[in-house]
Amino acid sequence: MNLLFSAVIALLGVVSAVSVYVNRNQPVIRDAPAAASRAETQLPEGHPPIDLSNRLVALEEMSRKEPQNAELKVQIGNTYYDMGQYQKAIGPYEEALKLKPQDPAVETDLATCYHNIGEHRKALQILDGVLRSHPDFPMALFNKGIVLQAVDGDVKGAIAVWERLLQTNPDFSRTADLEERIAQLKASLK
């Protein structure tokens, strides 16, 4: 039994490593249909889909055995997020933040969950908190622009946030896409 459990843990480690590598520089907020299948769509071509429900069961079992392990809580939240189950991702992210407060990546993921379930003000509140303590955190800047544009129709605010992102993070992985989006928004203001 211990050998089987060890094999499952090792497999999860490989899956997690592939997932982290594949998703490393991807924006957190996406169109809803893309977010629901993000884990499958970003796998290398020809790679079979990964059954995230099995991963989730194993992570939850490990978390029950290690309730103070913030990283396991984050991985559970990430798995729910990858499954498009944003409401269920909120709890594990909040638990992780109780164990390891002010982690900007986890706070940003939590904010995007709130955005995706329609709690946009809560998302902005969290993103503003991240940016107070980490003013140049790229994913918080990126996602704040998305929330401002999508929810408030605050095109000027979104442009300002994204221009700040490009200025403070010139190596941002989506620079070309973001520059194009900014140009389109500026043109729409004319």
Image: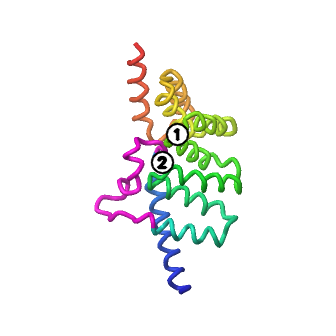
Q: Quadrant of the C terminus?
A: top left
Q: Is residue 92 magenta?
A: no
Mark 2 vs mark 1, foreground winner is 1
Identify the residue position indicated by label 2 in the image.
25
The picture quadrant where one finds residue 134 is top right
What is the number of the mark on residue 159?
none
Q: Amino acid at mark 1?
A: His
Q: Earlier in the sequence, mark 2 or mark 1?
A: 2
Left or right? Give the position of 132 relative to 8. Answer: right
On screen, residue 152 above or below 19: above
On screen, residue 68 above or below 120: below
Colouring used for the render: rainbow
Q: Mark 2 near mark 1, Cβ–Cβ under 8 Å?
A: no
Identify the residue position indicated by label 1 in the image.
115
Residue at 58% across, 71% down: 61
Where disc 2 sits, the SS reads loop
Cα distance in 3D space between marks 2 and 1:
20 Å
Find residue 173 and report its horizontal and vertical position in percent: 46, 42
Where disc 1 sits, the SS reads helix
Q: Amino acid at mark 2?
A: Asn
Find residue 4 and report its horizontal and vertical position in percent: 50, 83
Give, as a single range, the part of the protein colored magenta.
27-53
In this rendered view, identify the residue nearer to me: 173 or 57: 57
Find residue 92 and report its horizontal and vertical position in percent: 60, 56
Left or right? Give the position of 113 relative to 67. Answer: left
